[in-house]
Image (cartoon, helix red, strand yellow):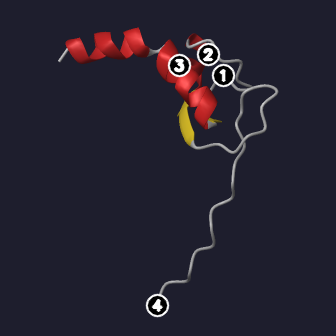
Amino acid sequence: MPPVKDAPDEKNCEVEKCSQKAERSVNARKALKAGLAVKEERGNVHLCREHYRQFKKGTKEERKLERLGW
């Protein structure tokens, strides 16, 4: 029988001056392009709900163009 996993560690939002609980993770470079002041430039960064909404608004046009390429 496999061991029971504990609850995952709760991460905080990685935008500067934000300490809310993170809910999503996105590519760090895309977050920078969206105008978020993230702490890292590589890999994924964790975002809280409020900053994820800002990320979605900041990348809306890019995502729209990406879908049109299909």
Q: What residue type is labelled 2?
A: Leu
70 relative to 18, above or below: above
| Earlier-in-chain disc, 2 versus 1 | 2
Q: Are marks 3 and 1 in contact (CB under 8 Å)?
A: no
**Residue 37 or 43: which is nearer the viewer?**
37
Q: Hey, which quadrant is residue 18 in on the image?
A: top right
Q: How far apart are marks 1 and 4 (CA)?
A: 41 Å
| Label 1, residues with CA under 10 Å away: few <14, some 14-19, many ≥20 | some
Q: Looking at this rendering, what residue extends furthest in the left direction?
A: 70
Q: Where is mark 1, residue-wise?
A: 41
Q: Where is mark 2, residue-wise?
A: 32
Q: What residue type is labelled 1?
A: Glu
Q: Which of marks 4 and 3 is in front?
A: 3
Percent across and percent down for residue 6 are 63, 73
Q: Where is mark 4, residue-wise?
A: 1
| Label 4, residues with CA under 10 Å away: few <14, some 14-19, many ≥20 | few
Percent across and percent down for residue 28 are 59, 25
Q: Residue 30 carries which label?
A: 3
Q: What residue type is labelled 3?
A: Lys
